[in-house]
């Protein structure tokens, strides 16, 4: 074994010199029985998928959860210079061609088809998004940052709704008005 790769649910032990690998874990990458590892130069992981890249040949194989990057059958890997990942998607940068291809969950950066990658030198990721850096530009180009912001907003809305529901139930148990106006006047008293 020359290298070991992992994600939260699976492992890959690569024997680079023999063009072989062993995978174990759950469905998020634990079965790589159909993958040809001959000529693999790098393996990248997301939370539930792996990508084995043959950079010299412009080829790659993906396995694991199809919605999370485990299916790259429609991706052209020729001229790819770098591959980046977050938990749910991958991004392959073709720096010399000013292009990138993203796949995986489109809500978390898996669709970057509308992004202009001219001048992009690096792509950075966190768990839920990608950000593409253009030197000299004041703002990054990001296929995932809006989705990440929506995710944060959705979490905040969920928290506020949960607080309202808890307060409403508490008031109902005490026999107080359950629904109040912004000024505290009772709208409905369901006691």
Image: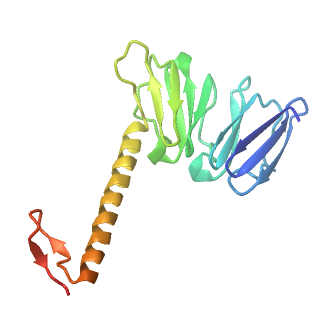
Residue situated furthest right in the rendering: 18
Nearest the eye: 31 or 152:
152
Q: Is residue 135 left or right of residue 5?
A: left
Rendering colour mode: rainbow
Task: Using the image, determine if residue 159 lies above or below residue 58.
Answer: below
Using the image, determine if residue 72 lies above or below residue 154: above
Residue 80 seen by the camera:
no
- The x and y percentages for residue 60 are 70, 35
Q: Is residue 108 left or right of residue 35?
A: left
The residue that appears at 60% across and 45% down in the rendered structure is 69
Quadrant location of the C terminus in the rendered image: bottom left
Q: Position of residue 85 (x, y in %)?
A: 58, 37
Q: From the top left corner, tell me how far across and down residue 177 is, in percent.
A: 17, 78
Nearer-the-camera pick, 52 or 184: 184
Farthest residue, direction top: 136
The one of 179 and 62 positioned closer to us in this rendering: 179
Horizontal relation, residue 5 to residue 107: left or right: right
Image quadrant for the N terminus?
top right
Q: Residue at 59% of width from left, 41% of height from top?
A: 74
Q: Is residue 101 visible?
A: yes
x, y percent for residue 91: 55, 34
Picture layout, residue 173 above or below residue 164: below
52 and 75: which is toward the camera: 52
Q: Residue furthest front?
A: 174
Query: In the figure, is residue 142 to the left or right of 5?
Result: left
Residue shown at 68%/43% (left/top)?
A: 50
Number of disc labels = 0
């Amino acid at each position: 074994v020359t290298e070991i790769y992992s994600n939260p649910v699976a492992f890959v032990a690569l024997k680079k010199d023999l063009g072989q690998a062993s995978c174990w874990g759950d469905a998020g990458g634990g079965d790589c029985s159909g993958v040809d590892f001959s000529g693999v130069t790098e393996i990248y992981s997301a939370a539930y998928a792996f990508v084995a890249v043959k950079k010299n040949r412009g080829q790659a194989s993906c396995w694991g959860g199809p919605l999370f990057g485990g299916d790259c059958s429609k991706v052209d890997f020729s001229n790819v210079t770098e591959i980046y990942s977050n938990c749910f998607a991958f991004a392959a940068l073709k720096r010399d061609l000013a292009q990138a291809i993203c796949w995986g969950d489109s809500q978390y950066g898996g669709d970057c088809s509308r992004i202009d990658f001219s001048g992009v030198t690096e792509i950075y990721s966190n768990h839920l998004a990608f950000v593409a850096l253009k030197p000299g530009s004041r703002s990054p180009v990001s296929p995932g940052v809006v989705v990440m912001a929506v995710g944060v907003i959705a979490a905040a809305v969920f928290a506020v709704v949960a607080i309202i529901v808890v307060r409403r139930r508490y008031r109902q148990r005490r026999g107080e008005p359950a629904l109040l106006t912004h000024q505290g006047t009772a709208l409905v008293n369901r006691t």
